[in-house]
Image: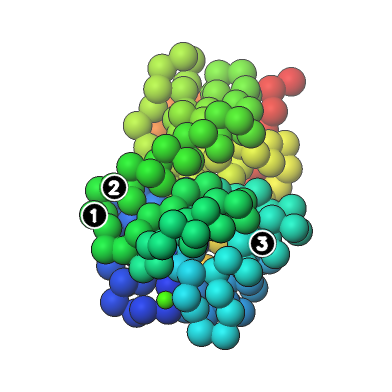
């Protein structure tokens, strides 16, 4: 899952990025309103952690703009502004939760997970490909009814392919989905991970096809 952390305070941003990575999330950082806005226009995030006081623009305005544009990604304000009117404003603007600094990382994680679960069970249906079923709501994949064990990145790749089942997904698209935005694609890394994934798919491995010169495709059953 990919999370955008919007935070101008560098140490806090790094702390959040490191903590969330350790929990298996892919994390993009934005240090100002403009870069946050660009990131949200360019990418699909599973959740956004949004600071309120940012250089140039405040998080409330970003939240309002995004909701007005139809962005329905879960948004959690993470801010030092703890006054009740601020909290109410944040929630009224369409944020999903409001966490006041300083906070315990465990609490942030628990709230983030709660939001992600809610968002997913509401919006993302399972993808049934015959022997392989991918369930974004539960973040798991089953082959012949048996859950397979995947790392966070393997799961992200599989989900990306499953959501576009029957279509070719390029290495670049896969990279963008499962690695940090702006990181340089490392030659062959996607292929290596696809190899791991194929191995874990076992009897369903034939569904994951290489399309020479283009990328990969998860085929739909006939
Ligand atoms: Ca700030």
Point out residue 204 in the picture as x, y percentages from the top left corner: 52, 25
Which residue sits at x=63%, y=69%? 61
Asked if residue 159 is positioned above or below residue 46 in the image, the reply reads above
Mark 3 Cβ and ligand 1 under 8 Å apart: no
Closer to the camera in the image, 53 or 6 = 53
Residue 91 visible in the shown view? yes
Closer to the camera in the image, 211 or 219 = 219
What is the CA distance from the residue labelled 2 to the residue labelled 3?
Answer: 25 Å
Q: Which residue is mark 3?
A: 64
Q: Which residue is mark 1?
A: 104
Of tags 2 and 3, the one toward the viewer is 3
Point out residue 217 in the picture as x, y percentages from the top left corner: 65, 42
Which residue sits at x=69%, y=41%? 164
Residue closest to the far top: 145
Asked if residue 131 is positioned above or below residue 8 in the image, the reply reads above
Reading the chain from its start, which is encountered first: label 2 or label 3? 3
Q: Secondary structure at mark 3?
A: helix
Point out residue 147 in the picture as x, y percentages from the top left corner: 40, 22
Q: Which residue is mark 2?
A: 107
Closer to the camera in the image, 141 or 43 = 43
What is the CA distance from the residue labelled 1 to the residue labelled 2?
Answer: 5 Å
What is the CA distance from the residue labelled 3 to the residue labelled 1?
Answer: 27 Å
Do labels 1 and 2 touch, CB within 8 Å? yes
Q: Quadrant of residue 29?
A: bottom left
Q: Secondary structure at mark 2?
A: helix
Q: Quadrant of residue 60?
A: bottom right
Which residue sits at x=62%, y=56%? 93
What label does residue 170 carry, if any?
A: none
Q: What number of labels is visible? A: 3
Disc 1 crowd, CA 10 A, few/some/many (<14, 14-19, 20+) = few
Q: Quadrant of the C terminus?
A: top right
């Amino acid at each position: 899952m990919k999370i955008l952390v919007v935070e101008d305070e560098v140490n806090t941003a790094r702390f959040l990025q490191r903590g969330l990575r350790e929990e298996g999330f892919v994390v993009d950082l934005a240090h100002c309103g403009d870069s946050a806005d660009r990131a949200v226009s360019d990418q699909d995030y599973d959740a956004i952690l949004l600071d309120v006081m940012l250089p140039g623009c405040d998080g409330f305005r970003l939240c309002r703009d995004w909701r007005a544009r139809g962005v329905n990604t879960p948004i959690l304000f993470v801010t030092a502004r703890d006054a009740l009117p601020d909290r109410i404003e944040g929630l009224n603007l369409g944020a999903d939760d409001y966490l006041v600094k300083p906070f315990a990382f465990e609490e942030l994680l628990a709230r983030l997970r709660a939001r992600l679960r809610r968002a997913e069970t509401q919006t993302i249906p399972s993808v049934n490909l015959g022997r392989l079923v991918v369930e974004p709501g539960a973040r798991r994949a089953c082959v012949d009814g048996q859950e397979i064990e995947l790392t966070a990145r393997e799961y992200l790749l599989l989900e990306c392919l499953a959501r576009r089942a029957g279509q070719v997904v390029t290495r670049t698209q896969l990279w963008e989905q499962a690695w940090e935005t702006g990181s340089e694609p490392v030659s062959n890394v996607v292929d290596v991970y696809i190899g791991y994934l194929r191995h874990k798919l076992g009897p369903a491995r034939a569904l994951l096809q290489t399309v020479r010169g283009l990328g990969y495709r998860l085929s739909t059953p006939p």
